[in-house]
Amino acid sequence: MQNENCRVTIPNRYTRSLWQSLPSRLLILAAVVLFLFGSSSQAQTNRVVVLKVDGLPYDMVDRFVHERDPLTGKSRLPWFDYIFYANGTRIANYYVRGMSLSAPSWSLVDTGQHLQIKGNVEFDRDILHTYDYLNFLPFLVKQATRGNVDMPGTEVLDSIQVPILIDAYDNYQRLPGSQLYGRGARIKAVQRAAEAKFVRRNPIELATEFVTGLDTRNIVGQQLERELLARLSDQRVRYLDLLTMDFDHTAHHNNDRESHLATLQQIDALLGRLWTGIQNSPMAGETAFIIVSDHGFNTDERVISQGFNLVKLLGSRAGGGHHVVTKRRLLMDYSIKAVNPFVPPITTTATDSYYLKGQSETYPTALLDFDGNERAGIHLRNTNLNVIHILLQQLQRKDLSPQLRAPATAAFFAAIDRYRAYWQDDLDKFDQELAALDRSAEKQRESCLAQPKKFTPAEIEMGRDDNARRVCIRAKQATEFHEGYSAYVAVVRNLLALKRDSFDPQKLKIEDLIFKDSMGRRNSIHDLQNYVVGLGKDGLVLKSDGALDEDRSFVRLDYFDLLKKQTVRNNVQANVSTEPIDFIATRIPRETIAAALGDDLKPDDDVVWLYSAPDRQALIIPRGEKSGGQLNLRYLPIANLTQTDEGQIRFDRIDWKPGLPLKILEDPRLDIGNAERAPWLSEWHTDLEWLHALHKTQYSNGLIGLHEQFTLFTAPGTDTDAADLTPDERLLNAFHRRQRRLVESDLMVFANNHWNFDVRGFNPGGNHGSLFRISTHSTLMFAGGERTGIPRGLAVTEPYDSLSVVPTILALTGNLESDNRPVESLARRGFKKFPGRVITEVAGSNFGNASR
């Protein structure tokens, strides 16, 4: 029996008849008790099986579940219908907390903690180290050759001491499949998959398939499924999961109903096999079965997703003439390297470079993470570093006139002095951090040498072989980082060591003063509004007083204005805007903008600025969470935000009006009851209040998601204020905090609906990565045996986000206290208090946290 609004579930015919025989007062009393204490208060979930489906949109699943197959009379997705609609609980309004992007989204699902990884690809601005979180093949090869044990995302989370859900279980208690946040690739499963496909088959059957075409697309996934089903009989195994990316891949390339339905039916059949295996297992009654997705999908049969090439724009003269680094090869490049997953970051050389012609491999000036389809992260080389580089080039010219040489030299040293105090302080701290890193690496190298070379089967089952390899890998990585950053620090110190009285540019090499493959310091708002890309058409120009006229000497671009004004002329789809870019977002440090906001809007964390046009801008201002209290957010409509060269920010406050970023005011699905829109929207609200009001609007919980994306959250491994740290631990935490900040882009660009930036192929079927509800509205459903207490036939309409997944699972398994803190055994494994709400409709009201 299902009731869309009531959270009390009557699970079966026997119970209904019992209730009907009770006197009405007892019936009411029983209902009240059940509502207050929950049927799961005595529940016992001792095993969790999770099917992870990449990019599975709830609305599409729901639509096909309710469609009847005319041949069978059953649902188009009969196992979804039976397991989760009739016999389980589905969260009808479940959303990505941040942007609908795979690596960040799965990190929220797997950790239950705030975002630390913000993109599918991240670039280190200092040394151009690239974190490629989606590339499975190099990981498998490294596993097979005794290299890295864990996926790149897991290594990053380990470095900042953020555990993932599977860390709640010992190695022998878990059987995770292949996934973005994986621990240890199951190489033997890959071997067994190959044997099942090629060795243990009838030779005639294999030869026939070879002639017609070998189908090897999912042989590893099928083997992982077989092994999961087999391990269900092992009562020591308490956590099992499986990942399928089939729907995400299908929907990127196909927007038709038939393709979507066919793939969903394959997933439905997989659900059936897993559910049947669970029911036949000895722990069926105490097993929770969960299906969860990282994001939804923006796909529409009426629209072909349209692509816009940001690489081409940035490389053009009008876009700055940048040499652009990406991790994925572009559509226009047909190359054997394109299929090689081990290629380093790829540089697209600008033919219209202003001052770095022929130097694209040593001095790229833009980094672009377009791997997110509906959004892109842009790093631009620091504009002041451009000025220093350009002036040094000019000063090395032998034909530079004496009248220009002296003012150019003065401007060169003025540019160095502009950042001298920042650089000096930063590099001094860097030296201390690198010294601590070197000491840590030495200890790890000694520990690595002390690790045993052979392990017993019992030790392998406990994962001690992988733990030994992790020690050696961390030592190697720490050494590599130390070498890379030390080289960077040395070059910057060379620049700071230049003295004007002994300055002879002819004796200097630029690469000794300006580090290769480095973007330098993140650009300020003023930098991005006045970005130097090269010399002006008249070269160096002097003022009347003989000083260098920097306004006339350099070509400057305002990247907010440049990006937003991009239009296309060849768009033939009526439902697609001629403007590819919706808005641009960036983080403004709290200390930079606090004075402009005043006491009434004083934030306690950094602010997010959204730019749609000079007169259509907004600030998202946070308060409360930094001090450990309740997060409150304020959306402030503004216009004409600028920053002076001295750092002062100015803007005009404006009234609410249509067309502001996120288009909240005019959205008919805004739900604030009977309150007047503009006054209500002009107040502070908790993130939960915003979620209730906004989740069904076009941009859904995007306001919360932007705060999540741009906030630099402190993790245990980046906390430098903890009281119990040794001096070296404090320095290492500062170093890991630095690394997380170095991957932050200057600008985040969001596409208009049905546009995308994926230059590899522009995905005509559809995309994700944005804040649109169609992309953030995801799938989360629970079902379980009679001892789990998971309600049957319940649709939860209360909105939840991905911070709720891990605490809800831990609550189901009895591993979470009522204040969202893990039990002591998990606290010893590094788990911390969870910021998200437990889904009490699933786990029981005794785990509720009403304030969140």
Image: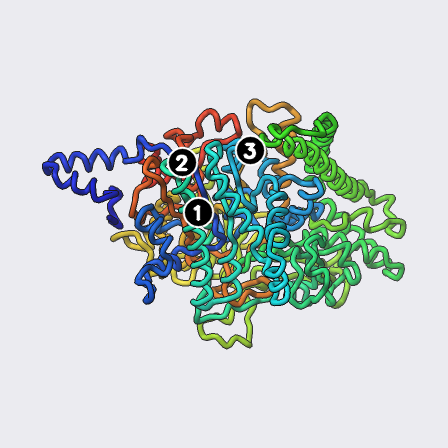
Q: Secondary structure at mark 1?
A: helix
* Mark 3 to mark 2 CA distance (whole Å): 19 Å
Q: Earlier in the sequence, mark 3 or mark 2?
A: 3
Residue at 69% in and 66% down: 333
Please state the horizontal and vertical placement of residue 376, each as a whole percent of the image: 57, 57
Residue situated in front as seen by the camera: 521 or 396: 521
Quadrant housing residue 725: top right
Residue behind mark 3 = 171
- Secondary structure, mark 2, is loop
Q: Residues within 10 Å of mark 3 (few under 14, many from 20)?
A: some
Front tag of 1 and 3: 1
User: Mark 2: which amino acid?
Assistant: Met
Residue 546: x, y in percent? 77, 57
The disc label shown at residue 637, or none: none
In the rendered structure, are the residues bearing label 2 and label 1 in contact, judged by CB atoms less than 8 Å apart? no
Residue 18 is situated, as x and y percent measured from the top left of the image, at 16, 38
Q: Nearer the viewer, residue 129 or 272?
A: 272
Residue tagged 2: 283
Q: For residue 274, which numbered disc appears in the image? A: 1
- On the question of residue 325 being in view, the answer is yes
Residue type, label 3: Asn
